Amino acid sequence: MQLLQTTDKDFSVKFKTLVSDRREVTVDVSGTVREILADVKVRGDAAVKDYTSRFDRNNLQSLHLSETFIAEHATQCPADVLAALEFAAERIVAFHEKQLPPDIGYTDTVGVKLGLNWVALSQVGIYVPGGRASYPSSLLMNALPAKIAGVERIVMTVPMPGGEINPAVLAAAQVAGVTEIYGIGGAQAIAALAYGTESIAPVDKIVGPGNAYVAEAKRQVFGTVGIDSIAGPSEILVVADGQNNPDWIAWDLLSQAEHDPSAQSILITDSEIFAQQVIKAVEKILADLPTTKVASASWQKLCSRHSGQRFSREYTTA
Amino acid sequence: MQLLQTTDKDFSVKFKTLVSDRREVTVDVSGTVREILADVKVRGDAAVKDYTSRFDRNNLQSLHLSETFIAEHATQCPADVLAALEFAAERIVAFHEKQLPPDIGYTDTVGVKLGLNWVALSQVGIYVPGGRASYPSSLLMNALPAKIAGVERIVMTVPMPGGEINPAVLAAAQVAGVTEIYGIGGAQAIAALAYGTESIAPVDKIVGPGNAYVAEAKRQVFGTVGIDSIAGPSEILVVADGQNNPDWIAWDLLSQAEHDPSAQSILITDSEIFAQQVIKAVEKILADLPTTKVASASWQKLCSRHSGQRFSREYTTA
């Protein structure tokens, strides 16, 4: 945690270092990923099973999770979590329905018909992290917009380290209307979705967050399929003055810090007192957070900057 | 040129081979591109100048093209071409203004304010090919939507092989409101736009077509900046029955064939007579086309397929 003040004479150098340092921690995994992609392209299911056995310690007979398996595990999702997922799904649908773009169609002054029609992709793949990060809510936010757009085949891959899977992820998949689930992850899952294997038909676009290997695999298959974006380490920037609730701001900052040890959370504020309150609130929460180890690693800096505009002094916690 | 009929018993194999073969011709340039990107990242302008000297045989004192240089060369654009560019620009603006997406903002049933505001990127880079392909129209189609969206800094790079530049490209840049032009191309131009150099400030997103090196460079910098897409070899698929003008269809097919020797043009039709008329029309045009060498290399196959639906027999020229 660093606290910088814009009145410090080396503020701009320190702030710049803070922000760009984070980008340097990424290990170059492109060679390893390239090999995995090439192997899956050639050997298909056999290669995916080998990597799944090696990286996830999971010997899958079938990559595809059966209806029975999904149903059995999804029912283990606690009722209150399921209710929360259903409530979230309703709200996500309501929001994204408003995003549906209108078609364009008109005849110009010289009589030429011009237009643009939106057509949904027929099949998309959603990567859902297992292991450290298990986000049923991200699954809803990725799958439901596809459903609303009219995508017919929504495929999901989720790694099952040691054969384990979070029941809430499978429950969320049911709520969101995912049509196929495969118990695989990493670059091998991205390769299977992009190129197809004997048991997995290829998709048109791959979305969803993943670790550095998944991000690099998406970068490499981009062009063969569409992708949403390269998800780097998470980051959050909160701009808040002293009239805010320090606990809420602390939770907002930690919401990203817990994703990844190289995640970055920054608060810009004009009140040093408020900055100190937020720091205390974060430390209090960190003491109890199940993800405290990761979140603490991210939570190491606090800095401030001066804008001279709306905030006469700004503090940035990072 | 290949003519396939859906009634051929090996039709589906041949058709599949035809379509996927094209994707195999791409040479792997990723290693070379990686080196160029890394070099520009470290050495900046000096590296860009070295590559420009080597690949474009052009020893630039300054990467930036001066107002005077642009004005002098743009005036060499023939008056009828300039008039056509201005006419095209008007039509492009009229179309893309209709695409401006509306913001979303509402308060839900429990009183939570939700919204989505569209904000233009502040700076974009447009890659414009020089050499074999010089497309002032593509420049208009890339720059004007940025202008309409509200992008303030629109940077363009265009290689000048042997110091040459197409006056129509500079005239189009003026018509489109491009704010800076650099006389560079290839992976080195993409690197300069993505990472910045001493004389070129980095941009947020890079768009525009280029050769295999440019496409691979865009893939590699994706994540550091946004990109539009990986432009592969061009392709066009025309579905037309015998009631069409064979000359028009021939021009449509050649419009993409001329881009690249590995471009692919396919016609699907239910009339063998029409397919033969289009082939004749293409051959007649090819005899006179300035880009005949490239277009002829692409024009080598013609095939057909059977849908059993609207077209009882379909011919595919590729």
Image (cartoon, coloured by chain):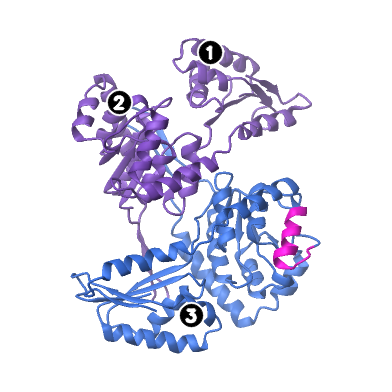
Chain colours: A purple, B blue
The picture places residue B4, in percent across and down from the top left corner, at 30, 76
Q: Quadrant of residue B7?
A: bottom left
The picture places residue B48, in percent across and down from the top left corner, at 73, 56
Q: In this view, does A215 lie above or below A84?
A: below
| Label 2, residues with CA under 10 Å away: few <14, some 14-19, many ≥20 | many
Q: Which chain carries label 1?
A: A
Image quarter of the N terminus of chain B:
bottom left
Q: Is mark 2 on a helix, strand or loop?
A: helix
What's under tag 3, amino acid-wise? Answer: Ser
Find the distance from the CA under tag 1 to the CA under tag 3.
70 Å
What's under tag 2, amino acid-wise? Answer: Ala
Find the distance from the CA under tag 1 to the CA under tag 2.
29 Å
Residue at image location 26% in from the left, 24% down from the top:
A83
Q: Mark 2 lies on which chain?
A: A
- Residue on which disc 1 sits: A281
Q: Which mark is residue A168?
A: 2
Q: Mark 3 lies on which chain?
A: B
Tell me if residue B58 is in the magenta stretch: yes
Nearest to viewer (mark 2 / mark 3):
3
Q: Compare marks 1 and 2 and give the one earlier in the sequence.
A: 2
Query: Do the CB atoms of the residues marked 1 and 2 lie less than 8 Å apart?
Result: no
Residue at image location 35% in from the left, 57% down from the top:
A118
Question: Can you see residue B154?
Answer: no
Tell me if residue A191 is in the magenta stretch: no
Q: Are marks 2 and 3 on the same chain?
A: no
Q: Is the magenta stretch mostly helix, strand or loop?
A: helix
Residue at image location 64% in from the left, 81% down from the top:
B78
Question: Can you see residue B26?
Answer: yes
Residue at image location 47% in from the left, 60% down from the top:
B97
Q: Is mark 1 on a helix, strand or loop?
A: helix
Magenta segment range?
A: B46-60
- Residue on which disc 3 sits: B296
